[in-house]
Structure formats: structure tokens, C-alpha cells
């Protein structure tokens, strides 16, 4: 066994072996994998071995596609068969809503180049003759689906890694991890210590325990999961003989069932409602190549539906029931990447579909370790998407909810109830009393919209316009015509201080820093010149700044800032988190409302657009940005939580004569649409450059240097290949949600990033990316945008439909 190495990967399941293989593939040869038992001693050996490419997040879909394509390469390098069966598969819809879901999935697949086809139930039956047509309305066919041998595949990764130079130590348990002062690691194993530069936690069922070795509580939980194998079935044998083909894979949302051929019978698994966590606090170290006791009663309701939908199963003998545990993060996607605050400690865990996702996880993590960047947009899998609020019991509640909903539709306006309310502001109760429908914004309850008196404060979930439509319209009109007030506690806030603060911000941001009392907007780029942040920065004094951004990205951004902070202590950056809460007032009467509650001069001359001031409001010390995401005259008012109630009360009282009205996040997002403002993680993501995203005016090429400058300069000189544009869509009762394909002359040329109904200008709007040469085609109806399978005419808007000269913000 080596005593020194560049990387120790902990865990010889499919994920650890994939990470090991990809490290060697990308050139790091001095790497080892340590496995406490035999390879596949966690979840990997008893998986059902199914794989597919579709995922709710298109970026994750892309990596699933990569994983499936990889298996041929692995077999060739390793000489080890993965027993690939590329059968194709269908998702079966049993309700009109599920048909809409399939149409959306197909549309998403279009711009990813996926060959998904909506087919009839009778066509599906030809490929899976035991289904009863009367239960279904339609199906979506995906040719890139199938199943494989989980153990063979894991060994293929391991063999390929060994051939490339990696070493694997079996029956060697990592017992502790000790970081040395230089940031490297002493990996204490049952067979002695290994000194490593990097450690990867791919501990699968024990990922939590491997996290605890370094004081981390990773948001993962294992759930028991059952599938059954039938005896040989005559219907299966007959189909094989008649068609020369295996049965395809089936996903039956109504029955919450997946099924496929196994041998000459069928494998059928279900995500049962009566689900059961496994080892919710501590995974036993003596668990290994063993199964859990099956509990058929638990899956009986789902099996009953399965027997109705696939009647031949009623006569099939059950050969075996497998019950095994595997892990999930609260949202069901993997946890990948470097952990904030722990140098060279990487995670690749919470992978619930190791045979669809393992390749992509291995590739992106290896890219990240070697090049400092994952090479793909993997926000949906980044471990940094959770904050400290994702506690053990929060995770346990959310994972169970996610498991139960595995085959349920998540509607675009659907908020999930488990572990809520989690974090609340002091106004929470008042907001509820006033009819607020709350949403979860990074663990914080945030008003989405306000139901007027007489209307139930509850979303009717839908892909179409819903019961919030009129209320949001009223909120938007209140802002545009007079004044509205909304809570903005869910923004991320940071304080940056120190003699090196300006130089630091100048280096990580593309814009120049503001003068004292002023504000700038600025993107942040990675070395590849791609967008990794979008901030508002206010300067309080020479060496003192406040910064505002997306709360969802707080850990992601802090990880980046801390990596780039000077080591001499000249800069301190502090996430304020819920140490501050915020209120925003916006609309033409916003100033009049503010004037009444402060002694400060807030006239347009004294307190200009993009000014920052500290002032007392209703006697409370507040920080105020004269800026508003509504694109209107507006103020963002920040304060400690203990003052929020009194500030809110004072603003509501002074706004009374102007009919001040609460507005929620949905109205805010609608108002920003009519100004063509982008949002972080939709229009602005690490796959776009600043010029593509139309943020070029915030990139100051005359600065001596900033991270990503060279790459951004290339984008500028070569010209962006695609551009963010806004569309006016001829919608019909349903607006875009994001990820719809954009058609031009019968070809898919781009994709929608976000959109919705803009209530003040009364237009259905969308934003998205199209090739640069098409971005100037503003003729009416030149494009089409596919909404729920219907191609709707769309026109590029050369300027924002509301206040194109941006006079309102400056009034
Ligand atoms: C019943 C069932 C059906 C499934 N069906 C499918 C399917 O059809 N398709 C699909 O894609 N996925 C399926 N899965 C999920 C799949 O099994 C997992 O996604 C995958 O196995 C996760 O792999 P992993 O490498 O992350 O974890 P694991 O397989 O749990 O591997 C972790 C490894 O790390 C080792 N380890 C942990 N801690 C230490 C330590 N301190 N020192 C040394 N070694 C350590 C363990 O011994 C283990 O071998 C199924 C799972 C189950 C249970």
C-alpha cells in the first residue's frame, strides 16, 4: 500500500470507481481507491441496473447521456462486460396533466439533441404487450434507456482505472481523516496511514459518516427500496420469440412503478408511499453484502395498481424480492464538488441513480479537481446548493417527501410541504394573516402572492395560468400605478471589510467598484469567462462594502470568495444571512412613502438612483439601496430582524393614502420580465459568457485585470455566438416555464431560460438564447416557442416593453 499519493478516493461503489477512472483518464495517475470490503459493498451490487437520460434539470440530462455513452468505452478499455441491454423505454401517461408533462419533457429533449418521441398507447403496447391500454393516454419513447449489470459495470470502471495506473486497496477501511497545517490529508485506514493531497468522499451509504470524520453533516439519507423478480412468464417468452426483441423499460407514473425484462420474466420496482428510511442517524459499519428483509405489505397498494395496469403479472410467480438501501439528497440529485471551508475535501455522494449518473459525476468531479472547474453547468448537483439549515432532521423529512414523490409531477407553481415552515422572518404571521401564499426560498418562508379577501390562500397547481393570476395582476398594477411593498429577506447579503477589500472585489468582479455612497451591478466570472455570479455592491466607506446576490448561491459564492481571498488577512468577507431582513417598496409613489418615515432628505437630488445610504426609518437603523428589481422607482431597505415589524408597520401606515399593497415574489418576477432583467440560475449561469447574456456594459475591459478577463476578451473580440433575447409570445392560457425549445424555420435554434405573464404590459414574455445571427430578426412572428407541445408564434423584442428609456427608476 502506498503511503503517499495525490488522491485517496473513499469508496468502491460505482461512483467512487467512476471518479477514480476519470481522474486517470484526465491524466492523474498517482491515485488510489480505498474500499472497506469488496468493491460494490454498499448500494451498488443490488441495484436494479436501469439507466435513462431524462432528468428534470437539462444539464443533468446531458451528463446522464454522457454516462450511457461511456459504457462502450469502458468495456473496450477494461475487457469487462457491463451486460448492456439498450432496450429503449417509455414513460406512460395516465392523466392529461401527465401528458402535458411528457410534452414538456419531449420539448426539453429537443434542444439537448435527444430523440424522444410521443407515441400512442397501442404503439407502446407493441413493445410491452402486457400493458392494459385502457389505463393510459399516451407515452414518451426514449431509445437511450436500458439496463446493465451493476456489479460488472462497477468492476469495468475499476479495471479501466487500474489499467490507467490507479491502485485499489480492498478490505481497507478509512477510519479517520486528519488535515495537516498545509491543507493536505492524513487518511487513517485500518491498514495504516496514507498521506494525500486530496480526499474524495464517495462513501455512498456511509457518505454521512465519512463527512462526520471532518465535522460535516452532509444532507443525505438512505431509504429502503424494493423491487421484485418474477418467474418466467409465457407472455415475455412469446414477445421475445415473435419480435426477436427484449421487452422495453416502462415507467408507469400512475402506479409509481418501473419495470423491465429480467431473464425471461419481469423486474418490477416501486417508490412506495409507505416509504421507510434506513439508518436515519448512523449507518452501521458492519453492513455489507446483505439485503434487508422484504416487506411486501408496504408496497402492496402500488403492486395492486401494477397488477391492474399489467394484468399478466397477476399470474406470474414471484421469484425474489430485493430490498436494499440507497441514498438521496433532499431534492434527489447528487452532491458533488469541493466543500466550502475544507481545502481539498471533495464529495461525490447522494447519487441515487448511479448507473445513469455515475459517469457524469466522475467526469465533472475529475475536471474540477484537475482544472479547477467542473467543465459543465452542474449547479443541480453542486454540494454548495445546501446551507447549514439543511440539518439531519430536515434532510430526513425532505428525502422521504422526495422518495414518495419520485414519480409525481412537480408543477411549476407547486411548493412542497415537508419540513416547513423552516426559517421565518418576524413578519411571517402578519403575512399569513394578510393572505400570503408562502414559498420556500433556500429554506426561508417567502411570500409568493397574496390572496384577496374571499379567495383561499392556496395554489391550484397547474402547467397553465392558475388561480394566482388575477391577484398577481393586481399586485403588479399596484406597483406600476402607485406603490407596493415586498419582503426581500431571501436575498444573500455580505459585508466586505478591510484595507484590501476594494482590490479584492476589483479582482473577482468585472465592474469597477463604486464611489462611497454609490452602488454598482456586476457580474462575476470564472477563469473560462463564464458567469458564476451577478451582484449588487454598495460602498459604505473607503474599506467597507455591502453586497447582495442570490441566496441559493450563498455557499457556492462563499466557496469561491474564500478560495480567492488574499492570505494576508487584509479582507474579511462575512455572509450576513438572516442577520438582516429586507423590505422593498417600489412604484411611482415609493418616495412619498419613504419621506414620511425618515428625517433624511430622500429627494431625487439628494438620494439618486443607484445611491446607498444609512438612515433611520421609523427610528430603526437601516441601510437603503435606491434600486429595485421591479425596474421602477424603488428602495431596498435592510435592517436587523428585531426592527422589521416596526419598519413594516410604519411603511404600511405612510403608504395607506397611496393604497400601498403587498406584493410577492411572483409579481416581482413578472415585473422584472417587462424590463428584460435576467435572473441568476436562469438567464445567468456558468454556461454563458457576459456578452452572450447581454451584461457587457458591466464588464470593464479597461481594468488592469480581473478573473476571466482574457476569456471575456476573446468572447468580445470574436463576438458572442449566441445572445440572450426577449420574446413576446402569442400564448394561449399557458406561458413559458423555462427550457422550452425556440424554433426558427422548422428548426430548433435555441431555448427559453424563463418567462411568464407580464401583467402590467399584458404580454406573455419569454427570455432565452438564440444564435447571434438570429438575434436581430425582430419581424413579427419570426420564431415559435413550444409551450406544452404547441408551437406558439413569438417575436423578438428589441427593447423592454415597459419603460424602455429607464426613466421610472430615475424619477
Ligand atoms: C434496490 C435498489 C435498486 C436500485 N436500482 C437502481 C437502478 O435501477 N439504476 C440506478 O442507476 N441506480 C439504482 N439504485 C441506486 C444505486 O445502487 C446507487 O445510485 C449507487 O449504487 C450508488 O453508488 P455509490 O458508489 O455512491 O455508493 P455505494 O454503492 O454505497 O458505495 C459506497 C462504497 O464505499 C465504501 N465505503 C464507505 N465508507 C468507507 C470507508 N470509510 N472506508 C472504505 N470504504 C468505505 C462502501 O463499502 C461501499 O462499497 C438502486 C439501489 C437499490 C438499493
Image: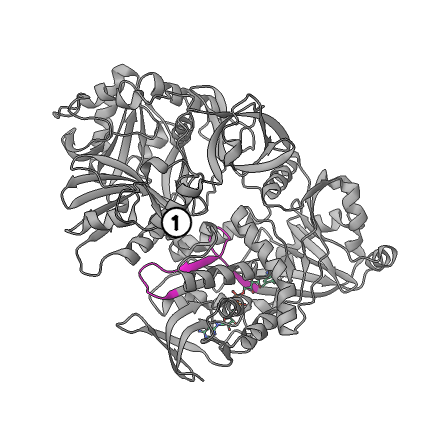
Along the viewing direction, whichever of 753 and 455 lies nearer the viewer: 753
Ligand 1 shows up in which quadrant of the image?
Answer: bottom right
The number of numbered badges drawn on the structure is 1
Q: Residue furthest top?
A: 657
Image height check: is 677 above or below 164?
Answer: above
Figure quadrant of the N terminus: bottom left
Residue at 60 percent across and 26 percent down: it is 792
**Does mark 1 have its CB less than 8 Å from ligand 1?**
no
Magenta highlight on residue 337? yes
Q: Name the residue under label 1.
A: 711
Q: In this view, does 365 lie above or below 609?
A: below
Residue 40 visible, this angle: no
Give the side of residue 377 with respect to residue 787, left or right. left
Q: How crowded is mark 1: few (under 14 residues within 10 Å), some or many (20 or more)?
A: some
In the rendered image, the quadrant that contains the C terminus is top left
Residue 669 in the image: state x and y as whole percent: 41, 31
Where residue 579 appears, as percent x and y from the top left, is 24, 45
Q: Residue at x 29, y 53 (%)?
A: 561
- Visible in this render: residue 509? yes
Q: What stretch of residues is rendered in magenta?
A: 325-345
Does residue 71 lie above or below 583 as drawn? below
Amino acid at each position: 500500500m502506498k503511503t503517499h499519493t495525490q488522491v485517496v478516493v473513499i469508496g468502491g461503489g460505482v461512483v467512487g470507481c467512476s471518479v477514480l477512472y476519470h481522474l486517470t483518464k484526465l491524466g492523474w495517475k498517482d491515485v488510489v481507491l480505498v474500499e472497506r470490503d469488496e468493491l460494490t459493498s454498499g448500494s451498488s451490487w443490488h441495484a436494479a441496473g436501469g439507466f435513462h437520460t431524462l432528468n428534470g434539470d437539462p444539464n443533468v440530462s446531458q451528463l446522464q447521456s454522457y454516462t450511457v455513452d461511456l459504457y462502450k468505452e469502458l468495456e473496450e478499455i477494461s475487457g469487462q462486460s457491463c451486460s448492456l441491454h439498450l432496450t429503449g423505454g417509455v414513460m406512460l401517461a395516465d392523466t392529461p396533466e401527465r401528458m402535458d408533462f411528457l410534452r414538456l419533457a419531449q420539448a426539453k429533449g429537443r434542444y439537448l439533441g435527444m430523440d424522444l418521441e410521443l407515441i400512442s398507447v397501442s404503439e407502446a403496447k407493441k413493445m410491452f404487450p402486457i400493458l392494459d391500454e385502457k389505463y393510459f393516454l399516451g407515452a414518451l419513447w426514449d431509445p437511450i434507456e436500458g439496463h446493465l449489470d451493476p456489479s460488472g459495470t462497477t468492476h469495468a470502471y475499476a479495471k479501466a482505472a487500474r489499467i490507467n495506473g490507479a491502485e485499489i486497496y480492498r478490505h481497507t477501511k478509512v477510519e479517520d481523516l486528519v488535515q495537516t497545517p498545509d491543507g493536505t490529508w492524513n487518511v487513517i485506514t485500518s491498514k495504516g496511514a496514507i498521506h494525500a493531497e486530496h480526499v474524495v468522499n464517495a462513501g455512498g451509504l456511509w457518505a454521512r459518516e465519512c463527512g462526520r470524520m471532518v465535522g460535516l453533516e452532509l444532507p443525505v439519507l438512505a431509504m429502503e427500496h424494493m423491487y421484485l423478480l418474477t418467474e418466467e412468464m409465457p407472455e415475455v417468452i412469446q414477445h421475445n420469440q415473435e419480435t426477436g426483441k427484449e421487452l422495453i423499460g416502462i415507467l408507469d407514473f400512475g402506479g409509481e412503478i418501473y419495470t423491465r425484462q429480467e431473464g425471461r420474466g419481469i423486474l418490477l420496482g416501486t417508490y412506495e408511499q409507505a416509504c421507510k428510511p434506513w439508518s436515519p442517524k448512523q449507518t452501521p459499519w458492519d453492513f455489507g453484502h446483505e439485503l434487508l428483509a422484504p416487506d411486501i405489505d408496504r408496497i402492496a397498494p402500488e403492486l395492486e395498481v401494477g397488477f391492474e395496469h399489467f394484468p399478466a403479472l397477476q399470474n406470474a410467480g414471484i421469484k425474489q424480492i430485493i430490498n436494499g438501501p440507497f441514498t438521496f439528497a433532499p431534492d434527489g440529485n447528487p452532491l458533488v464538488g469541493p466543500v466550502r471551508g475544507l481545502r481539498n475535501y471533495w464529495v461525490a455522494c447522494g447519487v441515487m441513480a448511479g448507473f445513469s449518473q455515475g459517469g457524469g459525476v466522475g467526469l465533472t468531479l475529475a475536471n474540477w479537481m484537475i482544472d479547477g472547474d467542473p467543465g459543465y453547468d452542474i449547479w443541480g448537483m453542486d454540494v454548495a446548493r445546501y446551507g447549514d439549515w439543511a440539518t439531519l432532521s430536515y434532510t430526513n423529512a425532505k428525502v422521504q417527501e422526495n422518495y414518495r414523490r419520485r414519480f409525481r409531477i412537480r408543477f411549476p407553481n407547486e411548493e412542497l410541504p415537508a419540513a416547513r415552515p423552516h426559517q421565518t422572518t418576524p413578519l411571517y404571521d402578519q403575512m399569513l394573516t394578510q393572505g400570503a401564499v408562502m414559498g420556500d426560498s433556500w429554506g426561508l418562508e417567502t411570500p409568493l402572492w397574496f390572496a384577496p379577501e374571499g379567495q383561499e390562500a392556496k395554489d391550484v397547481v397547474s402547467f397553465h395560468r392558475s388561480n394566482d393570476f388575477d391577484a398577481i395582476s393586481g399586485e403588479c398594477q399596484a406597483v406600476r400605478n402607485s406603490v407596493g411593498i415586498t419582503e426581500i429577506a431571501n436575498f444573500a447579503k455580505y459585508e466586505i471589510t478591510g484595507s484590501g477589500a476594494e482590490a479584492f472585489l476589483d479582482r473577482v468582479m468585472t465592474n469597477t467598484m463604486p464611489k462611497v455612497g454609490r452602488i454598482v451591478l456586476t457580474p462575476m466570472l470564472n477563469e473560462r469567462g463564464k458567469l458564476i455570479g451577478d451582484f449588487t455592491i454598495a460602498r459604505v466607506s473607503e474599506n467597507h462594502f455591502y453586497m447582495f446576490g442570490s441566496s441559493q448561491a450563498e455557499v457556492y459564492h462563499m466557496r469561491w470568495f474564500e478560495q480567492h481571498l488574499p492570505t494576508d488577512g487584509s479582507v474579511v468577507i462575512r455572509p450576513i444571512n438572516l442577520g438582516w431582513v429586507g423590505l422593498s417598496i417600489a412604484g411611482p409613489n415609493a418616495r412619498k412613502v419613504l419621506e414620511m418615515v425618515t428625517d433624511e432628505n430622500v429627494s431625487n437630488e439628494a438620494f439618486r438612483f443607484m445611491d446607498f445610504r444609512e438612515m433611520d426609518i421609523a427610528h430603526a437603523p437601516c441601510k437603503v439601496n435606491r434600486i429595485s428589481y421591479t425596474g421602477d422607482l424603488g428602495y431596498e431597505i435592510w435592517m436587523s430582524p428585531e426592527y422589521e415589524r416596526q419598519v413594516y408597520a410604519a411603511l404600511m401606515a405612510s403608504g395607506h393614502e397611496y393604497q400601498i399593497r403587498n406584493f410577492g415574489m411572483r409579481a416581482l418576477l413578472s415585473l422584472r420580465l417587462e424590463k428584460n432583467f435576467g435572473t441568476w440560475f436562469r438567464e445567468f449561469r456558468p454556461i454563458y459568457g457576459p456578452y452572450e447574456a447581454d451584461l457587457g456594459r458591466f464588464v470593464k475591459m479597461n481594468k488592469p485585470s480581473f478573473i476571466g478577463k482574457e476569456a471575456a476578451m476573446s468572447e468580445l473580440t470574436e463576438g458572442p455566438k449566441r445572445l440572450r433575447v426577449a420574446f413576446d409570445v402569442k400564448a394561449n392560457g399557458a406561458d413559458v416555464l423555462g427550457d422550452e425549445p425556440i424554433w426558427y424555420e422548422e428548426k430548433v435554434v435555441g431555448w427559453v431560460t424563463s418567462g411568464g405573464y407580464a401583467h402590467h404590459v399584458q404580454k406573455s414574455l419569454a427570455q432565452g438564447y438564440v444564435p447571434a445571427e438570429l438575434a436581430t430578426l425582430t419581424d413579427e412572428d419570426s420564431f415559435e416557442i413550444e409551450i406544452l407541445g404547441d408551437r406558439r408564434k413569438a417575436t423578438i423584442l428589441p427593447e423592454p416593453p415597459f419603460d424602455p428609456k429607464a426613466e421610472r427608476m430615475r424619477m
